[in-house]
Amino acid sequence: MSNFNMESDMGYLASMSEDERVVFLKILAKLAKSDGEFDDEEKLFIREMALVLGVSENRFEEINSKMSDDDIVEAAKLIKDRKKAMALVKEMCLLANSDGDLSDKEVLLIGRIGQAMGLELEKIEQISQWVVDRIVWLEEGKIIFEKV
């Protein structure tokens, strides 16, 4: 898989319907495109995630279709389970931070989607801070253990 460092513990996805998994992937694709670029690595990542999640290939075009921010926020409302919503926000934060450049547009989109799924801004910020702390911790580990 690509180097986006998505969480390996994705057991929560097993209980998602295919429609929920498609929304999950649409949201990640929209977030990846929100900085104005959707490079080959990001496309490959979304495709690999779709395969891992068991989403049928005939839905790939739907996943990558152009959607407005309002449309994707509306689609996010399909995910009603709090644990799934928190997991999705975590994955969004990991993806948004993967290029080392978290834009205001990405932050706003993560917040709007999290709130559409019923999460409080405080919880979204808490998850985001945890992701940033984790990234810093992993980078410090590379230096400490001379893996740079």
Image (spheres, helix red, strand yellow):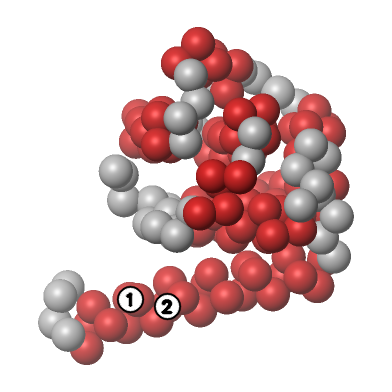
Circles 2 and 1 in contact, beta carbons < 8 Å: yes
| Amino acid type, residue under disc 2 in the picture | Val
Q: Position of residue 129 (x, y in %)?
A: 61, 75
Q: Which mark is residue 136?
A: 2
Which image quadrant is residue 125 in? bottom right
> Dot 1: within a 10 Å radius of its alpha carbon, few (fewer than 14), some, or many (20 or more) residues?
few
Q: Which mark is residue 26?
A: none
Between the C-alphas of marks 2 and 1, the distance is 5 Å
Q: Residue furthest top?
A: 58
| Amino acid type, residue under disc 1 in the picture | Glu
Residue 46 showing in the rendered view? no
- The residue at the point 50 percent across, 54 percent down is 11
Q: Is residue 138 above or below residue 23?
A: below
Residue 113 showing in the rendered view? yes
Which image quadrant: the N terminus? top left
Q: Is residue 62 above or below residue 80?
A: above
Which image quadrant: the C terminus? bottom left
Q: Which residue is mark 1?
A: 139
Q: Residue furthest front?
A: 15
Q: Position of residue 87 (x, y in %)?
A: 61, 57
Q: Is residue 144 above or below residue 20?
A: below
SS category of the residue bearing label 1: helix
Left or right: where does residue 3 sit relative to residue 12? left
Q: Position of residue 65 (x, y in %)?
A: 61, 18
